[in-house]
Image (spheres, grey):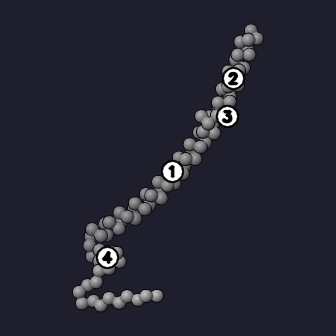
Amino acid sequence: MKSVLLGMAVVFAALQYKLWLSPAGLPGVQGIQNQISAQQNSNEVLAKNNAVLLQHIDALKQGGTALEASARDELGMVKQGEIFYQTVG
C-alpha cells in the first residue's frame, strides 16, 4: 500500500513539474500567446499599409492627376513646353 501511494506521489510530482515548470506547460503557453499577440499587431499594421497601397493603385488606375503626379515625382516627367529648374541647396 505504501509503495502504491509513493508511486502515485511521484507521478503527481512529475505531472506538476510538467505543468508549472517545463517549456511545454504554462510558461510555454504564455510564450505562444505573446507571439500570437505580436503577430496580430504586425498583421494589423500590414493590413493598414495594404489599404493605403490599394487606394494608391486605384488612383493610378483612374488616371488623371494622380498618374501625372506619380510620373513627375518618381520619373521626373516634364511636359512639353515646360521649363525644369533644379536647385541645389
Residue in the image at 41% along x and 89% along y = 87
Which residue lies under the disc numbered 4?
A: 75
Mark 4 nearby-residue class (10 Å; few <14, some 14–19, many ≥20): few
Residue in the image at 44% along x and 61% along y = 48
Residue type highlighted by circle 4: Leu
Mark 2 nearby-residue class (10 Å; few <14, some 14–19, many ≥20): few
Q: Earlier in the sequence, mark 4 or mark 3?
A: 3
Q: Secondary structure at mark 3?
A: helix
Q: Secondary structure at mark 1?
A: helix
User: Is residue 69 visible to the viewer in this orientation of the structure?
Assistant: no
Which residue lies under the disc numbered 3?
A: 20
Q: Give the quadrant of the N terminus.
A: top right
Mark 2–mark 3 Cα distance, whole angstroms, equals 12 Å
Residue type highlighted by circle 2: Phe
Q: Secondary structure at mark 4?
A: helix
Mark 2–mark 4 Cα distance, whole angstroms, equals 71 Å
Q: Is residue 2 left or right of residue 59?
A: right
Q: Earlier in the sequence, mark 4 or mark 1?
A: 1
Q: Are the residues at dot 2 and dot 4 in contact (C-beta closer than 8 Å)?
A: no
Quadrant of the image occupied by residue 12: top right
Residue in the image at 54% along x and 51% along y = 38
The mark found on residue 39 in the picture is 1
Mark 1–mark 2 Cα distance, whole angstroms, equals 36 Å
Quadrant of the image occupied by residue 74: bottom left
